[in-house]
Image (cartoon, grey):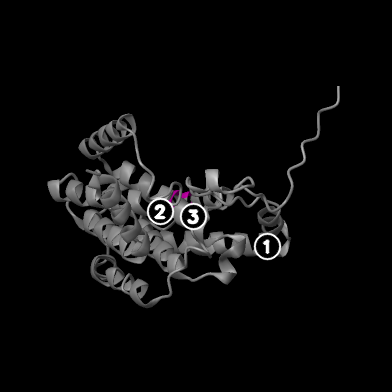
Amino acid sequence: MPNPTPVSAQRIAKLLASGRRWVVLAMLLALHAALISPQGDVFQRVWLLVHFGLFLVWQPFFATERELDVFSVVMLLAITAVTLYFVSGWMIVTWLLLLLGILGGRVFTIQAARRSRFYLVAFAYVLAMLLLWAVPIFLLGEHELPANVVTFARRVLPFVLLTLVVLPFPSEDDSGQVFDFFYAVLVFQLCMVLALGSVVSMRFTDDDYVESVLVTVMGLGVALFVRCQASGLVGFVQIQTSVTWPRSSDWKSSPRCPVRPTRPLVLVPARA
């Protein structure tokens, strides 16, 4: 009698892959519920667990239908349990920065102009929650935020995610598991500059965090604009090697190497 477990697992994997839009939406809604929950509360840990589980389903590094061995499952469960038990404010902020980098690796690629802006809305939501909620609440402990900012972060921003329902979702043929590592690192660094710069700018805004965020965003925008005019940032981005991250199932099926740099990498030996 055949074992139905692999067939069921394959069906679940195909179902999740076909409903990736809803996985992303549920992942971000669970993240929002965890962020607005009291810090260290059991509900925050539960929602973070749901968020991490949905992230593993969506993550662009490995195929959803890939089977994990026992050791990998045990290590994954152990790391998740330890992280949720010792969860703190700086860990949540760090995770948001990493998530922004991963989303940036899907959005700000050379092929982005030919794809949907689905992930761009998700990126904007996570960035807004990082600057308007996570940094002041989890890092600064500043609970005296303006009432309109608190209302906007808690009750208005979740409705932005509803646009993910109507926006066209990138097809697997167009985006698939396309992930640009260099863009992800660049976006991660820029978002870190925004978060830390907002904290540092409070020294010049009489400890007004909202004003410091505006100053930091405008300052970074002006700096990037001047840099782009000098062709520095544009040149830096265009010469990066854009890497297509393959699905794990493509390694055996593809006759060619699935990692294809758009520009050749030339290694010049050092002179003696």
On the image, the x and y values in percent for residue 167 come to 41, 75
As drawn, 180 above or below 226: above
Q: Which residue is mark 1?
A: 228
**Magenta highlight: main SS:** helix
On the image, the x and y values in percent for residue 171 come to 47, 67
Q: Residue furthest left?
A: 42
Q: Which residue is mark 2?
A: 202
The residue sitting at 40% across, 60% down in the picture is: 127
The residue sitting at 23% across, 40% down in the picture is: 84
| Magenta stretch, residue numbers | 192-196
Mark 2–mark 3 Cα distance, whole angstroms, equals 40 Å
The residue sitting at 68% across, 59% down in the picture is: 234
Q: Please tell me whether mark 2 sits on a helix, a strand or a loop.
A: helix
Q: Residues within 10 Å of mark 1 (few under 14, many from 20)?
A: some
Identify which residue, 138 or 56, lies in the foreground.
56
Mark 1–mark 3 Cα distance, whole angstroms, equals 29 Å
Q: Which residue is mark 3?
A: 177
Residue 198 occupies which quadrant of the picture?
bottom left
On the image, the x and y values in percent for residue 133 come to 30, 58
